[in-house]
Image: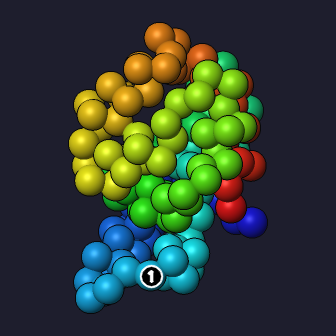
Amino acid sequence: MSHKSPAELRSEAQAALKEFRGLEKIRARDRLALPQQEMPSQEPIVRGGNMYEVTHGYFEEQARLEAERCLQCKNAPCVAGCPVQIDIPRFIGRIAEGDYAGSLAVIREASLLPSICGRVCPQENQCQ
């Protein structure tokens, strides 16, 4: 896999989100067809020469697109797999709406240390 620039990643996410939001009716198969987003990160040549964080975090469009991939399962296996029982579908739903403060509030209902949970949780393996 080649390293894409942050500008390329953002542009691709903007186009995919616009197309997704243009659908008349959104079905589960539409959500499953959304591409998993690549996290913007330092260029490989740059990261070898510093001790800074490698990943930069998603752009807003990427975060919302990733959130739209959630199927909002009734049995929520992601919540069952979460050691602190965060209501993952609800916080992801808030991200899809662009309500980041609301999303953080949902996380803080169950965890006072969300950044630590984000570092140690294998969330990318919970639901695909």
Residue 56 drawn above or below residue 32: above
Image position, residue 123 (x, y; %): 66, 42
Please name the amino acid that badge 1 sits on.
Arg
Location of the C terminus by quadrant is bottom right
Q: Which residue is mark 1?
A: 27
Q: Residue 78's quadrant in the figure?
A: top right
Hey, which residue is sitting farthest top in the picture?
112
Does residue 62 appear anywhere in the picture? no
Q: Nearer the viewer, residue 36 or 40?
A: 36
Q: How many badges with numbers are in the image? A: 1
Image position, residue 42 (x, y; %): 58, 41
How packed mark 1 is, by other alpha carbons closer than 10 Å (few <14, some 14-19, many 20 or more), is: few
Residue 62 drawn above or below residue 17: above
Does residue 3 appear anywhere in the picture? yes
Hey, which residue is sitting farthest bottom in the picture?
24
> How has the structure been colored for display?
rainbow
Question: Who's the residue at 52% across and 64% down the image?
Answer: 71
Q: In the shown orientation, is residue 92 left or right of residue 86?
A: left
Say which element carries label 1. loop
Image position, residue 31 (x, y; %): 50, 74
Hey, which residue is sitting farthest front in the picture?
75
Q: In the shown orientation, is residue 47 left or right of residue 60?
A: right
Q: In the shown orientation, is residue 38 left or right of residue 89?
A: right
Location of the N terminus by quadrant is bottom right
Residue 84 drawn above or below residue 29: above
Image position, residue 108 (x, y; %): 41, 19
Question: Who's the residue at 37% across and 80% down the image?
Answer: 26
Q: In the shown orientation, is residue 16 left or right of residue 115?
A: left
Question: Who's the residue at 26% across and 49% down the image?
Answer: 98
Question: Who's the residue at 32% across and 86% down the image?
Answer: 25
